[in-house]
Structures are given as structure tokens and as C-alpha cells.
Image (tube, grey):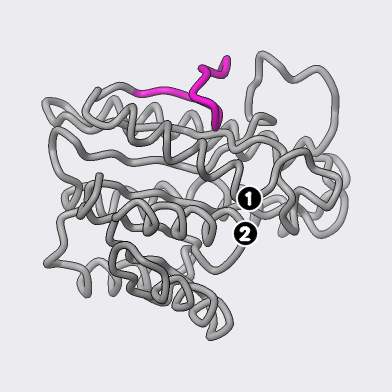
């Protein structure tokens, strides 16, 4: 939506930065959250490109006080899109039996609970009708497609995010807001690795196509970057 406002949470690098760049290129105005000066510098470079406005804000999504402060600072903006991009893998073992309790807790908090807290903090600032709330999920979040033990904690945390997105959609009552969990594909980022099949640019172009095509439907779904439904 040209001239619309998007809040992109986690826009420092990788998919979040790419998403902000693609939206800005299409004429969206962007508030992108970053965690440090390096992330702010990368985000602000986008502002030199033709397109919408870019605004950088600092946020640690695991800090409730920072979420509340950001909500206050952005009080005057009505958003057409809130996109929460967050994801970490365990630093140690990736299975539930071997990871420490702190490692497991951090994965679920960052990948599922904190993104939902951010989304709910801004829910009343999302425009009814065309408005959308989206979360960066993963193909690994599909329980139906889970046939191996690869990265089980990460997979489970993203499945939890998907479940929470369904709860969010169910809580909207008469409000008409589209809610999506988006699987970006296997992307060449720090997490995806150099051997991944997609560039950031390829993934985010598809994601924004999906966002723009689904806006206004008021539907909830789990979709990939090509717009195909992913089984829950």
C-alpha cells in the first residue's frame, strides 16, 4: 500500500532489513526497529533510495518497558502493517533434552512470546479493514510436515508462535484485521547459511507480494513467500 505506514520489528539486518527495503521501494513509509547503532546505520541507508519515509527506533523485544515506551512514541501513527520479525536458535544443543533451561526459555521467549507481546501492544494502532499483523514464521513450524528431529526447539518455538497468532486472530472480535504467519523459505542469512536456496531479495519480494494481495481479506493464515498455504 503506497503511502501506508508499516512497523517492521527486527529491521537491523537479514530478512527484516530486506523487508523494510522492499516495502520502502514500493512507497510504504517505514518505522523499523533496531537494537544497536550498526543496525540503525544499515536501516538509514535505505532512506537514500526513492520511495517512502524511513524512521529508525530502538527496541529489545524481550524488554516490556521498551515495548511500552515505543508504543508511546508512536502514538500518533496508524499502521497498515505491523510485521514482527524475530528468531534465534539455541546457542548450544538444539534438542529439548540437552539444551539448558535458560537456552530453551530464551528461544521460546524471543521466537514466540515476545513477538506476540509486541503485536498486542500495537493492535489498537492497526487500521481496521486494510490493516494487517504478520509474523516471520518458518516452514519448520509446520507440525504436520515435521518428519525429523532437526532443530527441534526452534521448530517448536515457531509452531508456538503460529498457535499464538491463531489466538490473536480469534481475539479480534468484530475488528477486521488480517493476521498472517509467513514462512520466508530457506534464505541466505546468518541463520539460513550460505547454502540456502533463496537470496533475501527474492524472499522479501515474494513476502511483500503476499502481504499486499492478502490485505483487506480479514483472514488468518500460515503461508509461504509464494503465497501458498502451509499446513499447520
126 and 205: which is toward the camera? 205
Q: Which dot, 1 or 2, sits closer to the camera?
A: 1
Determine the residue positioned at 34% across, 28% down: 213
Q: Earlier in the sequence, mark 1 or mark 2?
A: 2
Determine the residue positioned at 76% across, 48% down: 192
Residue picked out by circle 2: 14
Q: Position of residue 75 (x, y in %)?
A: 15, 67
Q: Position of residue 85 (x, y in %)?
A: 51, 52
Decide if residue 111 is on the left or right side of residue 144. left
Determine the residue positioned at 14% across, 33% down: 129
Find out whether the residues at labels 1 and 2 contact each other: C-beta distance under 8 Å. yes
Residue picked out by circle 1: 200
Identify the magenta region.
220-232
Would you place residue 207 above or below residue 44 in this image? above
Q: SS of the residue at dot 1?
A: helix
> 10 Å neighbourhood of mark 1: few (<14), some, or many (≥20)?
many
218 and 108: which is toward the camera? 218
Query: Outermost residue, bottom direction?
Result: 37
Amino acid at each position: 500500500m503506497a503511502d501506508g505506514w508499516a512497523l517492521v520489528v527486527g529491521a537491523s539486518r537479514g530478512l527484516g532489513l530486506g523487508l523494510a527495503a522492499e516495502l520502502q521501494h514500493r512507497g510504504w513509509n517505514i518505522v523499523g526497529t533496531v537494537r544497536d547503532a550498526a543496525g540503525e546505520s544499515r536501516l538509514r541507508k535505505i532512506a537514500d533510495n526513492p520511495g517512502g519515509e524511513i524512521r529508525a527506533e530502538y527496541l529489545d523485544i524481550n524488554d516490556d518497558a521498551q515495548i511500552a515506551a515505543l508504543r508511546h512514541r508512536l502514538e500518533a501513527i496508524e499502521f497498515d502493517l505491523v510485521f514482527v520479525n524475530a528468531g534465534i536458535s539455541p546457542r548450544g544443543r538444539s534438542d529439548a533434552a540437552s539444551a539448558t533451561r535458560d537456552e530453551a526459555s530464551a528461544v521460546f521467549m524471543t521466537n514466540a512470546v515476545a513477538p506476540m507481546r509486541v503485536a498486542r501492544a500495537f493492535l489498537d494502532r492497526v487500521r481496521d479493514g486494510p490493516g494487517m499483523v504478520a509474523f516471520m514464521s518458518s516452514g519448520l513450524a509446520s507440525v504436520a510436515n515435521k518428519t525429523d528431529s532437526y532443530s527441534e526447539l526452534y521448530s517448536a518455538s515457531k509452531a508456538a508462535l503460529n498457535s499464538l497468532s491463531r489466538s490473536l486472530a480469534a481475539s479480534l472480535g468484530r475488528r477486521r484485521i488480517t493476521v498472517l504467519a509467513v514462512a520466508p523459505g530457506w534464505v541466505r542469512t546468518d541463520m539460513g547459511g550460505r547454502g540456502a536456496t533463496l537470496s533475501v531479495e527474492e524472499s522479501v519480494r515474494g513476502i511483500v507480494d503476499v502481504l499486499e494481495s492478502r490485505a483487506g481479506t480479514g483472514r488468518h493464515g500460515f503461508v509461504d513467500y509464494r503465497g501458498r498455504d502451509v499446513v499447520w
